[in-house]
Image (tube, rainbow, N blue to C red):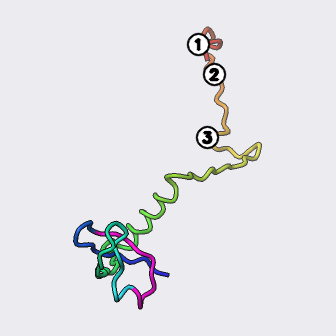
Amino acid sequence: MPVYDFQCPDHGVFTGLVSYANSLSGLECPCCGAASPVLPALPQISTLSSALRRAENRAEATSCEPKVVKRSHLPSCGCNLCKKATPPTSRRWMLGQC
């Protein structure tokens, strides 16, 4: 069943889970029991471009659960993460400080 918004004259807006046929006749306010008409629903139209919408969805998806990416390296892959720099020979006194 769909969720509709109703307007009570005394207590304001509240939501109700009713069928379409029952929503047309209104719903009683849960606080005072007064008859409350259904509010018109506005269409969900997005004004964002598709690229911005995809970026926003991607940011929302990764904000609470970031993906963990692991990369296995071959012994001779040659990337900067795997390269081990040799200490400079001109400063042999600094070898223990690294």
| Percent x, y of residue 92 | 63, 11
Residue at the farthest right position: 75
Q: Which residue is mark 3?
A: 80
**Image side of residue 15 versus residue 10, left or right:** right
| Residue linked to disc 2 | 87
Residue placed most toward the observer, 81 or 69: 69
Question: Which mark sits nearer the N-terminus, 1 or 3?
Answer: 3
Furthest-top residue in view? 93
Tags 3 and 2 in contact by the CB under 8 Å rule?
Answer: no
Magenta part of the protein: which range? Answer: 13-22
Residue 91, numbered label: 1
Eyeballing the image, is 42 above or below 98? below
Place residue 82 in its image quadrant. Answer: top right
Q: x and y percent of residue 51 in the render? A: 40, 70
- Judged left or right of residue 82, residue 39 is left
- Which residue does the image show at 33% across and 83% down from the upper left? 26
Q: Amino acid at mark 3?
A: Asn
Q: Residue furthest bottom?
A: 21
Decide which of tag 3 and tag 2 comes sooner along the chain.
3
Q: Where residue 66 appears, x then y in whole percent? A: 56, 51
Residue at the location (38% across, 85% down)?
23
Q: Does 35 appear above or below 66? A: below
